[in-house]
Image (cartoon, rainbow, N blue to C red):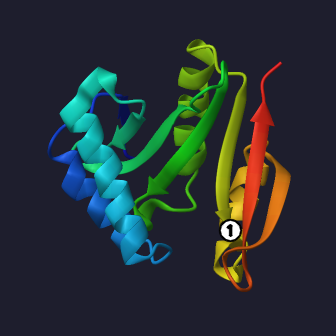
C-alpha cells in the first residue's frame, strides 16, 4: 500500500497534473478541462486573494488527486466543491473518500456548515452520484435539461451540525 500525503498549497507543476487527471478521466469535455486549468492558474496568480482553495493528494512521486473548493460568494458558511478528481489508476480504492473527508475537514475548520457539489445526470455519472451519496451527500436539486437536452444538473448537499 502506498503512502499518500495531503497539501493545500498550489505549485506551478500542479497545472500539468490537473490537466492530466481531468483529461484522462474520460468524464470531462475540453471546455471543462480549460476551466479546471483556469481555476488553478488563477490560484497561482492571485494566491490568497483567490477565492479558490485546493487540496492535493500525492504519493512519493506525483499528484494523484485533488479538490478545488471555495466559499460561495455572498454566503457566510456555504461552500462549493468545484472539482474532485483522482487518478484513473487509483479510482475505487477509497482515495477519493479520503480526499473528500480531508476537504470537508478544512471547510469545517474554516467555518463552513454547508457544502454543495453539482454534477450531470447522464448515465456515465452514476458512479459520481453513488460517490457523493456514500460520502453523506443528499440530492438537493435537480435542474432539468440544464447542460443540454437530456443532461440535467444534480446538486448534492451536505450540512454539518
Say which residue appears at 71% left-offset and 86% top-offset. 149
Corner quadrant of residue 33: bottom left
Residue 131 is left or right of residue 140, and the answer is left
Q: Quick one: SS at disc 1?
A: helix
127 versus 69 height, above or below: below
4 versus 140 height, above or below: above
Say which residue appears at 15% left-offset and 42% top-offset. 12
Corner quadrant of residue 56: top left
Instruction: Give the percent coordinates (x, y) of residue 70.
Output: 51, 33
Q: Is residue 126 visible?
A: yes
Say which residue appears at 45% left-offset and 42% top-offset. 68
Q: Quadrant of the C terminus?
A: top right
Which of the two residues, 156 or 131, is positioned nearer the viewer here?
A: 156
Residue 67 is left or right of residue 43, and the answer is right
Query: What residue is shown with label 1?
Result: 127
Instruction: Give the percent coordinates (x, y) of residue 151.
Output: 70, 79
Residue 34 is left or right of residue 53, and the answer is left
Which of the two residues, 149 or 32, is positioned nearer the viewer here?
A: 149
Q: Is residue 21 visible?
A: no
Amino acid at each position: 500500500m502506498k503512502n499518500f500525503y495531503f497539501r493545500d498549497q498550489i505549485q506551478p507543476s500542479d497545472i500539468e497534473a490537473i490537466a492530466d487527471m481531468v483529461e484522462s478521466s474520460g468524464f470531462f469535455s475540453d471546455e471543462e478541462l480549460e476551466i479546471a486549468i483556469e481555476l488553478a492558474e488563477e490560484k497561482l496568480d492571485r494566491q490568497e486573494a483567490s477565492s479558490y482553495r485546493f487540496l492535493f493528494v500525492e504519493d512519493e512521486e506525483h499528484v494523484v488527486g485533488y479538490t478545488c473548493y471555495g466559499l460561495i460568494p455572498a454566503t457566510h458558511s456555504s461552500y462549493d466543491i468545484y472539482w474532485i478528481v483522482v487518478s484513473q489508476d487509483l479510482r475505487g480504492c477509497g482515495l477519493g473518500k479520503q480526499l473528500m473527508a480531508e476537504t470537508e475537514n478544512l471547510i469545517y475548520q474554516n467555518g463552513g456548515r454547508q457544502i454543495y457539489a453539482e454534477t450531470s445526470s447522464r448515465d456515465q455519472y452514476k458512479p459520481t452520484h453513488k460517490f457523493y451519496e456514500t460520502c453523506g451527500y443528499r440530492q438537493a436539486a435537480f435542474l432539468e435539461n440544464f447542460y443540454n437536452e437530456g443532461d440535467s444538473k444534480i446538486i448534492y448537499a451536505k450540512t454539518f451540525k
